[in-house]
Image (tube, helix red, strand yellow):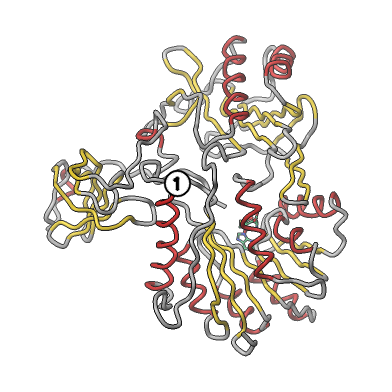
Amino acid sequence: MAKTTKKRRGPQPAAKAELNVPVRVGQTVEVEITGLNHEGAGVGRIEGYTLFVDGALAGEKVQARVDHVKKNFGFAKLASVVEASTFRSMPPCPVYDRCGGCSLQHLAYEEQLRHKQQIVRDNLRRIGGFPVEGEGAIPVHPTLGMSEPWRYRNKAQVPIGEENGALVGGFYAEKSHSIIDMDECLIQHQANDEAVSAVKRIAASLSIQPYDEVRHTGLLRHVVAKIAVKTGELMVVLVTTEETIPRMDELVDAIRTQVTGVTSIVQNVNPDKTNVIFGKKTVTLWGSDVIYDYIGPIKFAISARSFYQVNPAQTEVLYNKTLEYVGATGTETVIDAYCGIGTISLFLAQKSKHVYGVEIVPEAIADANRNAELNGVKNATFETGPAEVVIPAWKEQGIRPDVIVVDPPRKGCDEALLTTILEMQPQKVVYVSCNPSTLARDLKVLAESYEVREVQPVDMFPHTGHVESVALLVRKDMDR
Ligand code: SAH
């Protein structure tokens, strides 16, 4: 799980750049790129000093303009390619340079997959100290990618603003509060793009005031569209500063008739001066409160606020691999730590005796219980709380898991949880990770009692730098 926005780094004021390094801010340098970092930037060296060049690829010679220097490394932007990589491809997106949502569109997709496999390997070696080549190496399999790696996102969250008196919606221009209008995002599902465009058009025609982030005025802040890919149901969420929407009936009627497939129109009220998208209050304006989708055979109810994986096709690939690694036969007790809305738990419940899911966000646990009921799943129990507190309590209660699945956020597992896993001694641990560096760090701790049998990267976010993978760990005393 991850957001597909990359960090923006602003240029550095020249005055600050008085460091004893071989480059200075504003300088254009020629540099050979030897690799790609985990954010997808090219890595080069100038007199031993590391320079990260956005937009450059391994094997290239480029001209780059330095825009930020630190003591041990600096950042630069690609100015021109002197010698291009054979894997360089033309980014099809017209706003690729300005948006920042994707960082690898200029690399051929097959090579993106190899790059992600390599990132996992590098982290296991550097941070985990694991062998990844030769005798006794941990197999890191080729990344499972998409045959059609475009239009995969099922959720669009588009900020609305004003430009020369007109309502616009798209993305924030770099380091600014102004919004660049955009009607098409190539990694977004077509239905979401069309829904957002239609809502923008309708809102403009009804003179609905766009939100002004700086002055904190206006009404419409965000338009969110969510498509349930398997059922075709579509939800439109209007995030507004106030509850009252002028000409509300006309607005709802127009969305109903002009947005293909819409089954739910919802308003969320966010009166605060904040860059958090949603406020506390949600009202259904028309249609259903939720849309339904399936991942494999499991049905999910998705509300305006509920978390749901954004690439459903690859989520199924990831969960099937997780299920395969768990290898449940129907007799196992399984713990799903960091369970979110219970997606992995419900997948696992099909094949095991009982699944215990734990998650820190209470709303997600409410969704998990509802989804269990929706699927007639009776062998899953969900509890709200930190995994590192709840799982030790389960241990005290005598729960003895055969397998523990963890799917933590980017910062990885809490140390207390790793200690508990080592004490509970399940036969297997299956680690689903959205961050190879914390994966490697945590596997190193678990390696005290577990053998890392294999790691499978899965491309959940094509054209972005995000690397997801799942690792199978088996207790050392178990037969091979
Ligand atoms: N397994 C789910 C969600 C994974 S995302 C899925 O595949 O959809 C990671 C989840 O961990 C988030 O839902 C987050 O709220 C939760 N989380 C973060 N810290 C936690 C903690 N200390 N204990 C339990 N859950 C936590």
Residue at the image point whose x is 53% and y is 85% from the top: 448
Q: Nearer the viewer, residue 329 or 22?
A: 329
Look at the numbered disc 1 and say if its residue's Cβ is closer than 8 Å to ligand 1.
no
* Above or below: residue 382 compared with residue 465: below
Q: Quadrant location of residue 199?
A: top right
Horizontal placement of 139 versus 266: left or right?
left
Q: Residue 135: where, in percent of width, then height?
A: 42, 82
Q: Residue 470: where, in percent of width, then height?
A: 57, 64
Residue neighbourhood size for the residue with mark 1, other residues' Cα within 10 Å, grouped as few (<14), some (14–19), many (≥20):
many
Horizontal placement of 176 versus 229: left or right?
left
SS of the residue under disc 1: loop
Q: Nearer the viewer, residue 189 or 443?
A: 189
Q: Nearer the viewer, residue 193 or 26?
A: 193
Report the amino acid beneath label 1: Thr
Horizontal placement of 243 versus 25: left or right?
right
Residue at the image point whose x is 24% and y is 46% from the top: 76
* Above or below: residue 201 compared with residue 46: above
Residue 175 in sight here: no
Horizontal placement of 402 versus 479: left or right?
right
Residue 111 in sight here: yes
* Above or below: residue 442 compared with residue 408: below
Q: Nearer the viewer, residue 287 or 277?
A: 287
Q: Residue 204: where, in percent of width, then height?
A: 57, 13
* Figure disc tally: 1
Residue at the image point whose x is 68% and y is 41% from the top: 305
Which residue is labeled 1 in the image?
464
